[in-house]
Amino acid sequence: SNTPFREYKHFAHEGGISSPLIVSWPKGIDSKNNGRIERQPGHLIDLMSTCLDAASVKHPHQFGEYKIQPVEGMSLLPAFRGGKLVRKDALYFDHHLNGAVRDGKWKLVRYGDSGRNAKLHPWQLYDMEIDRSEQNDLAKKHPDKVKALAEKWEKWAVRARVKPWPWKVD
């Protein structure tokens, strides 16, 4: 478990998706940033874009006759250098029906039970700026935000081929 965060690997709550990233690059990151803790969220999908940016190369669109999928992430170099990350879209998660979307300060997350008795639990909403350990579910206070983020997650799930699931879900 990632104490003090909720849950553990397999779940889309912070304990399941949050891990520290330690970066050392003396020639690429100014020493004034040594030891600094960066609190802007990054995602595994950002690592490819970060490596390409660090190498000063562009992601190819084609290899011979094959079209290459664009990368989904963004470079984390601005954050490594003390700058602000500006995402074009939210961060999305899904693992065995445990799903989440993080958009700015908001995180929508739900449990899912996969397998023979597959079941989706209600969405939970958290303000990550003040409740990173996901203790205060705001879903009932902000139903419009839940609806908007759930719709974003559904569109992403179809586009990213997360859905249709191999399970029949009640």
Image (cartoon, rainbow, N blue to C red):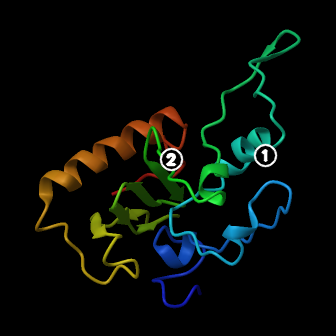
The residue closer to the viewer here, 168 or 8, is 8
Nearer-N-terminus badge (2/1): 1
**Residue 10 position in % (x across, y down):** 58, 71
Which residue corresponds to the image point at 36% horizontal and 55% vertical from the top-left?
104
Q: Which residue is mark 2?
A: 165
Kind of element beneath mark 1: helix
Q: Is residue 126 above or below residue 101?
A: below
**Residue 25 appears in view:** yes
Left or right, residue 153 beside residue 71: left
Which residue corresponds to the image point at 75% horizontal and 68% vertical from the top-left?
31
**Residue 45 appears in view:** no
Residue kind at label 2, given as amino acid type: Trp
Residue kind at label 1, given as amino acid type: Cys
Q: Which residue is mark 1?
A: 51
Instruction: Nearest to the eye among marks 2 and 1: give it.
Output: 1
Which residue corresponds to the image point at 81% horizontal and 67% vertical from the top-left?
24
Give the crowd class for mark 1: few <14, some 14-19, many >=20 residues within 10 Å.
some
**Residue 108 position in % (x across, y down):** 33, 61
Residue 26 lies in quadrant: bottom right
Quadrant of the rendering where the C terminus is positioned: bottom left
